[in-house]
Image: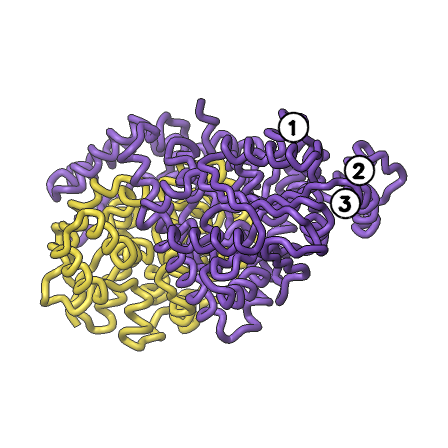
Amino acid sequence: MRVALFVTCLADTLAPAAGQATVAVLERLGHEVVFPEEQTCCGQMHANTGYQLQALPLVRRFVHVFGDASFDAVVSPSASCVGMVHEQYPRLCELAGDEELGARVEALAPRVLELSDFLVNRLGVEDVGATFAHRVTYHPTCHGLRGLKLGDAPLRLLRNVRDIELVELPQAESCCGFGGTFAVKNADTSAAMLTDKLRCVLDTGADVCTAGDSSCLLHIGGGLSRARAGVRTLHLAEILASTG
Amino acid sequence: MKKAGFPQAARPELENAQLRRNLRTATQAIRGKRAAAVAELDDWEELRDAGAEIKERTLRHLDVHLEELERQVTAAGGVVHWARDAAEANALVARLVREAGSSEAIKVKSMATDEIGLNEALAEEGIAAWETDLAELIVQLGNDRSSHILVPAIHRNRVEIRDLFARELGEEGLTSDPAELAAAARRHLRERFLSVGVGISGANFAVAETGAICVVESEGNGRMCTTLPHTLITVMGIEKLLPRFDDLGVMLQLLPRSSTGERMNPYTSLWTGVTPGDGPQTFHLVLLDNGRTEALADAHGRQALRCIRCSACLNVCPVYERTGGHAYGNTYPGPIGAILAPQLAGMRDHTSLPWASSLCGACYEVCPVKIDIPSVLVHLRGRIVRETRDAPAGERLSMEALARVLGSRRRYEAAQKAARVAARPLARDGRIERRLPGPLGEWLRFRDLPAPPAQTFREWWRER
């Protein structure tokens, strides 16, 4: 398959390893990965903060960049940014009264897939040939769990990683408190949520906390780092790319 | 003047260890009960669809159904009144109580009367309104505010309640055993039930085709108030309507399982107008707008008016679980409050509430009438940014600047490089942890930030 990588602005700038690992996994499975360099940001931060009108040009840009018919799929290491395309783009087009854009979004969205969704549900692959000899706990991000309804797709992939010791995260389904600009606009409440998440992560005794969104990992990882907890965060793709 | 916004109001609540414990225990218990009660039904999703559809259809033709309700209630011997806002409704109820020859009223737990501040308004007119729901009584005796739709005293634990009863009801020597506390409340309430001639209630549902009013509760105290007094006054938001009696069949399955995690509601009271020789002989129905018509004009936001006040969204909300209800600064806390309160206020108040959510989506998942709360939150954020001046000016400027940067590959890549350079003096050992002003500083109060790596993804891609 010819797969376009939608890396997200956050991974591009702050967590390039998640993007590199996504490329590695897809190429290992024999797919052609292309990276359309005109991509910037899907507009989620603007839309979620109330600046929908400012997000619209970014919607147009996304549709233009990824609308290329030669892409069999547009794959992203972020449930949150994929969810933006699926859930919010149609409403933004409605708000703008742009039916033509709406039709293009409708045509494109089914091809825009989160990494684990693409691997497990589209390709039917659960063993990507990874080896990772660490104690790992998995945090299902809200947009993956309740938005895209990824179910156990990420866990199926992790269970097939060789030498991994996977430990269940207590209260896994609770939000880590990131929520985009929520983390800075309601920093105290966000921190209270984060503290509870960190306690659960630490209770597992894991060396690594993983998830399918670099944004939530930035939050959880930032908390672990501030607490000098000695627990790393790694994107799911990084574990799947690891060969030991 | 506007009240302090949610971020400020949340701070003292977050530091209240007793409150945090009470909320954690209570919300997690109700959450588990709800999940179990819902899991028993194979057709739960179909019920939710039916509930959403009934409510949505009703809201679209609300005018027609309301007039039908008025006709039916009047035909059954009731008197229907219309109140545009809180002041009109309060003045009306005060007049009706006085006309009934009373200076007291006993009350069924009701969100609508809390919304309009009826008790306080009646007190100013020299009318004492006695709350009879146990939790509302606790709130009233403590001169406190409700912090949960279903469990108004969720922020209080048993020991606090025992102390309150000892102080306010003169009940010395009580233990914190729930049965003993309930018995103390009963001694206090019995007297009122048997002596006060006016009852005031809200309504969970009203059936347009028959004129029936429905109140659901767990204690039976509500039924005392709707049956013992000679005069009954019901204050009901105009969106509480159902077109047909059969619609109750859906709602009465959805509501108890979502709110208390019970299969069936313990006390479901239904009455239609007045019945000679049985129950109140005078019945007044006050139909309250108070911002609802204005909310109806918003095609996306109006789904908030489907709400049946089950409070399932509060119990699963990670924000509510930590801040409690008072931080929301109005009658309706939690996720539903965050979309209802600003709309009922015509977007002129409570405008910080739509941001009081991480958009985690837990509320939408449990809502029995499928209100897409996260999507309405985002929608209302947009309205507040576009229609009011309540968004911080600095935020607006930086969002616009950032949109320009992200609108061009050249500017975006230049900004990536600039961020890397700017971060260099701030970072130590690959992380930024120092105090800075602005939004970045808010992040850094509680979390470190990794320094931008030496290469962006795209730089790596070009080089590989």
Residue that carries the numbered disc 1 in the rendered image: B123
Q: Determine the image quadrant of residue B28.
A: bottom right
> Which chain gets the purple colouring?
B
Q: Residue at x 26, y 35 (%)?
A: B386
> Which chain gets the yellow colouring?
A
Between residues B366 and B263, which one lies in front from this camera angle?
A: B263
Chain hosting mark 2: B
Specify whether A171 is left or right of B305.
Answer: right
Specify whether B294 is left or right of A66.
Answer: right
Q: Is residue B426 visible?
A: yes
Tag 3 and tag 2 share a subunit: yes
Residue that carries the numbered disc 3 in the rendered image: B193
Chain hosting mark 3: B
- In primary-sequence order, the first of circles 3 and 2 is 2
Between residues B139 and B217, which one lies in front from this camera angle?
A: B217
Give the residue type that dot 3 points to: Phe
Q: Residue furthest top?
A: B1
Residue that carries the numbered disc 2 in the rendered image: B165
- In primary-sequence order, the first of circles 3 and 1 is 1
Chain hosting mark 1: B
Between residues B460 and B227, which one lies in front from this camera angle?
A: B227
Tag 2's secondary structure?
Answer: helix
- In primary-sequence order, the first of circles 1 and 2 is 1
Whether tag 3 and tag 1 are in contact, CB under 8 A, the answer is no
